Image (cartoon, rainbow, N blue to C red):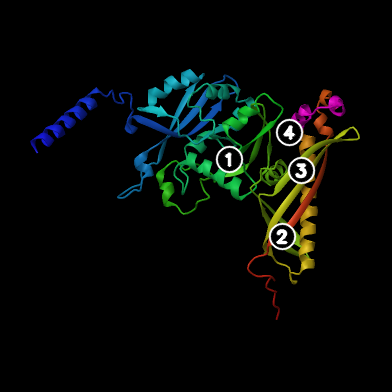
Amino acid sequence: MILQAIVRTGKLLALGAACCSLVGCWDMVEVNQLAIVNLVGMDREPGNGKYTTYYQVINPPGVAVQKGAGIKAPVYTYQVDGFSAVDLAEKTFDIVPRRPFYDHYQALIVSERFAKEGLREVINFLEKQPDRRATIHVLVTDSPLPDMMKTYIPFERLPGRAQRSMIEFQSKYSGRESRRSRVKDLVENMESSMLTVLPIVSLSGAKPMPTTERYEQIDANQGNYIMKGAAVFKHDRMIGRLESSDLSWFYLLDGGIGVFSESLIVNGERVDLQAPKPEVRRQLVMVSGKPVLKVDIYAEAQLVENDQNVKLTERNLDEIKAQFNAQTKKKASEFYEKTKRLGWDLLGIEAQIKRKSGKEWADAKKEEEAWKKTELQLAVHCSIRNIGTTIDPYKEKRG
């Protein structure tokens, strides 16, 4: 027993000596020493080039479940003005009492005038940082940026996280957004002919909601973020915008749509179809000396609304499918022609032409804007896989 006690004591002493020799994490920073940034907003004055940057910093007690009197602010917004990235960084420490921590911020919102002037300097700065957060989403706002950055929004108390969630949910469950709206997506097209499409976000309501009293109001539409189309970028500069009604057609032809929905009028009544992740096959070919983009869309749709006052027969289903195919082809072709008139090569045809080889493509590769002569040949193939829990719609009863 004495020998065992001596051995046990020796092991404890050895373990203690080993622990004393450990260096430890002397450079560790406690959470309460950090200002965790959740959302960044940026504007630039066209005349003098002065940057105005807004940092939304998380207030942990305001995000946690709150008990007792009063609601604590979930975020605090700091405004910093400067003429360069270094200037902004130095001035941040003048007003923020903690070390800014950018590793987990969710989105960057830029003003529309800044987007139109060009984001090259900001992109170059982000690319040089080890914590550059290439996966954050970039959004453009057509609302006053101070109002956007100084508004508490309902339900999701961290505006940066709300923006990221809205983009990701819409990209999955609708045809109006895409996850390809990150810093890395803009960077990839900076020095090519490819265009980038980034979301536009606005502030709903007549005024911002800068106090926590906002959380005591039931009207969620007032003082909330709302998606309002998309900004079209060439290189680093915004050159135009797509309306919300355009986005499903762009993402459909681009092949990146999450869910495609379309409303039809069949037998004088409304019929709605929804197709999750339609398959899009694209091929650029040369036909009689002219580029032709062949697009085949395969949609397995489900019937989500049917107000027809007739039985849902096989013949009726064929009518629905035929009209869906014709209407989708017509609207998608109209969207394509509209973008050509605007001079926007949204489908990246010019880049595809440059990658082609062979004598038949030699002239097209030399010609400027040869993509504008490209004809779209579109074919839509619809099948209906789900007609709901009831086969026939309930009929309208009169008298």
Q: Main secondary structure of the magenta part?
A: helix
Is residue 38 toward the left or the right of residue 175 in the image?
Answer: left
Of badges 4 and 1, nearer the viewer stands: 4
Is 218 magenta? The answer is: no
Q: Which mark is residue 98?
A: none
The residue to which callout 4 is attached is: 348
- CA gap between label 3 and label 2 equals 25 Å
The residue to which callout 1 is attached is: 201
- CA gap between label 1 and label 3 equals 22 Å
- What is the three-letter code of the residue carrying label 4? Gly
Secondary element at tag 1:
strand
Q: Which residues are magenta?
A: 347-363
Of badges 3 and 2, nearer the viewer stands: 2
Is 360 magenta? The answer is: yes
The residue to which callout 2 is attached is: 384
Of badges 2 and 1, nearer the viewer stands: 2
What quarter of the picture does the N terminus occupy?
A: top left
Of badges 3 and 4, nearer the viewer stands: 4
